[in-house]
Image (cartoon, grey):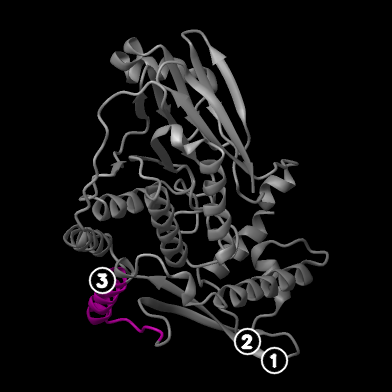
Amino acid sequence: MIYREKFLNDLKCSLVIKDSGTTFADLARLYGYPEENGANLCKKDYYKFIKACEDAKAINSEERYITNHIEELYYNSLVEENNTTMASNKKPVDSEIENLVLKSKWEVQTKGGGKDVLKSYRNDVTPLQIKKFREDLINDLRDYSPVKSFTVNKSIDYNKNMLLISLPDYHIGRRALSMDIVDEYIGVINKIIYRSDIDNIDRIVYVIGNDFFNSDSNYSTTRGTPQFDYNEWQETWNFGKNLLLHSIEYLKEFGKPVDIINVPGNHDSNKIFYLGDVLEAYYRNDEQITIDNSTNLFKKYVYGNTLLMFEHGEMKDTDYPLIMASEFPREWGECEHRVTMCGHLHHTIVKEYRGNVTVKFLPSLATNSEWEKSKGYKTSPKAEGNIFSKTEGLIYTVNVKR
């Protein structure tokens, strides 16, 4: 099915914009569709894609109800960068698509015998412009970040526990963006909270990342495997940013310290790191929030006598005990309970090893992809909340279905 992925990815990246001249049979041969019925399959893929785009456009500004100030800063910075690029770009640019340089165009036949023009574009935004945009955005957010005091109870109450919320592999972009996604995500967090006896919780650890997005900004995984997203990468980034901000603000309402740990995934390592930058800047003056957005592949968190390690889940499960011991030797020696939390596999796996080490792969809320369906993988979308005691380690797991 690589030919379909390539065709849809080129449509998504605006390398193919429907016009006239080339028939669907020509496109089918170009992308390697099967000879038998290939033109018809290509045609169906095209119009399915067009319908998905039209559905996505129906999403209006009501979804942008979270952090209006951040949206304004982001938009203004983006416009400034666009103007800089346009002013310095002497090549022909399509008047309807900013910052994209027109490379070529050709005609194709449309449904009903009409004609359209396919256009191929190149994005000339440079790495230096991206770096400058990131720096300006972060500085603006730091200047805006409101001071919010929060008093942490320093006395140790051994009757209180820690709630770990990790919703890995959400893959924003795999479905067309809608308020249903917001309601689903926040609804799952809400169920976890209210099934966890929140009055007996003294801290919330919120793990983000872990393939939160379906793709990086080039419509592929971080290592380059093509992915099909229903929306532009800028739209998914803004949507995901707002969703995480909304979820953090929701968790803050329960009056507990919220410790956020950003774990890079194999689909969105760059994009989620930039989003961690935004969160760090926005909450830099909020005493209720701590954020670990370090570049470390393995992240740690110590609660009572439990050492927790977080990684996306791309290692062999048998390797994690030794990795934990070598990465965090002091914490390994001081803690009685040792737990590694992973995602990546989209279903629950729990294994125990010598050294009182538990390796746990968490389930996913994501819809199964076409690739997963073609391989016979089918999981029931669900999530977990894990509750840790200061003395006994992991004591309870809350299971929630989507």
Q: Residue at x 29, y 51 (%)?
A: 277
| Residue 249 % position (x, y) | 38, 54
The answer to the question of whether label 2 and label 1 lie on touching residues, with beta carbons closer than 8 A, is: yes
The one of 132 and 62 positioned closer to us in this rendering: 62
Measure the alpha-carbon separation of dots 2 and 1. Answer: 7 Å
Q: Residue at x 68, y 85 (%)?
A: 109
Q: What kind of element bears circle 1?
A: loop
Mark 2, other Cα within 10 Å: few <14 / some 14–19 / many ≥20: some
Q: Is residue 101 above or below residue 139?
A: below
Q: Is residue 73 above or below residue 17?
A: above
> Looking at the figure, which quarter contains the N terminus?
bottom right
Please report whichever mark, 3 or 2, sits nearer to the chain's N-terminal start: 2
- Quick check: is 80 in the magenta stretch? yes
Q: What kind of element bears circle 2?
A: loop
Q: Which residue is mark 3?
A: 77
Q: What kind of element bears circle 3?
A: helix
Measure the alpha-carbon separation of dots 1 and 3. Answer: 41 Å
Q: Which residues are magenta?
A: 72-94
Q: Which residue is mark 2?
A: 20
| Residue 270 % position (x, y) | 37, 49
Apparent side of residue 359 relative to residue 2 in the rendered image (left or right):
left
Residue type at the position of mark 3: Ser
Q: Which residue is mark 1?
A: 114
| Residue 223 % position (x, y) | 46, 45
Measure the alpha-carbon separation of dots 3 and 2. Answer: 37 Å
Please report whichever mark, 1 or 3, sits nearer to the chain's N-terminal start: 3
The one of 257 and 308 positioned closer to us in this rendering: 257
